[in-house]
Image (cartoon, rainbow, N blue to C red):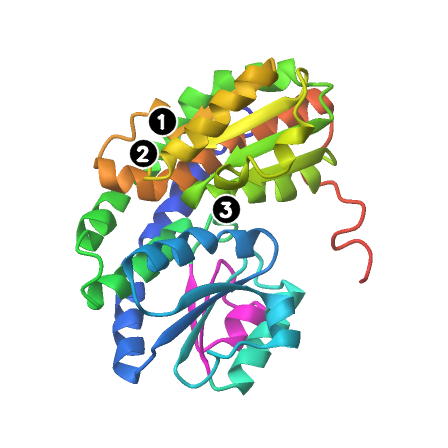
Amino acid sequence: MLGFDETAFRSQTASAVALRPQIENLVDALLEKGIDNVLLIGSGGTYAQMWPYELLARERSAIPIRAAIAAELVVAGDALLGERTAAVFTSVSGTTEDIVRAVDYVREKGATTVAFTGYPESPIAQGVDHALISEPKTWPFDMQMLLLIGRLLERRDEFDGYTSLADELQNLPDALVAVAEQAEPVAAAFADAHKDTDYYFLIGGGPIWAFTYLYSMCILEEMQWLRTTRVHSAEFFHGSLELLEKDTSVIIFQGEDQTRGLTDRAESFAKRVSKDVTVFDTRDYALEGFSPENRALIAPIVLDTVMGRVSKHLERVRDHSLDLRRYYRVMDY
């Protein structure tokens, strides 16, 4: 597989799943401390990755759990923030400047701080009360967030499927390698067909909306300098659909949760207009070792693996490195 280090991929994924005992002990300690609200704080892609877990909590729990943009939180504040807040951060490098500032800000307000990263000596890991360390470059953070929020809801008697989910996550490295292998020819064909495409229209909903936003902004825009429009499938019929034309390249991300029908509706309409609609659907993958209810919960991780193959092949056909930037971490702002 193009640019795929299977050994590193397996090891990184397993390292995130292996945090389960630490995460469970931490959640138990937070509840014992009297934590009664949680802020999931990120920046860019790590902010988007918080959305499925805000949504999971909103669907199942009465405890306030909400996502926040780090830079905005520092200047606008949050009425929940205080001594009973658990503030959760993620950062691959542990050096994201907006996150560093947000850690300092919430600690000043009395919050208990938690971070997931791969670098124990990084400013973020050193700045929080509880740093949970996976292998360097481990991505995405969905495994850790599923365990964290899942355990919290279980302890509140709001998620009786947590143990099943946590147990099945042990199967994730094998399942995702199989996903990558199956997706490889699909990714290569998509990239070859879209070598000269310079504009994409992306649609997703429910817990998949976060990945839709992330892939549009962080990969196609930031890493490939391509223009995109991204729209939630539930909001598809309120504005952005007017941009569709017969040659518009539409990418649809589909999961297996209760919002699937909303994305099906958007797909059906898009195919009436555009002749270039590609659907990436987690149902196409076996995901051995995962029950139907847990397949829905890991769908963002599955799509990340599938589209990781697409990204590498776009890099190939466009001769544009995924590491190339004009502005991000190049120019001060």
| Magenta-colored span | 111-133
- How far is the residue under mark 3 from the one under mark 2? 24 Å
Q: Nearer the viewer, residue 279 or 223?
A: 279
Residue wearing tag 3? 210
Kindly identify the amino acid type of the residue bearing the numbered disc 3: Ala
How many residues crowd mark 1 within 10 Å: few (<14), some (14–19), many (20+)? some
In the picture, measured across the screen, residue 3 lies left or right of residue 229, that is left
Q: CA distance from mark 1 to mark 2?
A: 6 Å
* CB-based contact (under 8 Å), mark 1 and mark 2: yes
Secondary structure found at label 3: helix
Q: Position of residue 57 (x, y in %)?
A: 34, 59
Identify the image quadrant of residue 242. top right
Query: What amino acid is at disc 1?
Result: Ala
Residue 157, by quadrant, is bottom left
Q: Which labelled disc corresponds to residue 174?
A: 2
Q: Which structural element holds mark 2? A: helix
- The structure residue drawn at horizontal position 39% and vertical position 27%, both measured from the top left corner, is 179
Question: Between tags 3 and 1, which lies in front?
Answer: 3
Q: SS at mark 1?
A: helix
Ranked by sequence position, the earlier of labels 3 and 1 is 1
Vertical position of residue 119 compared to residue 126: above or below:
above
State the mark number for residue 178.
1
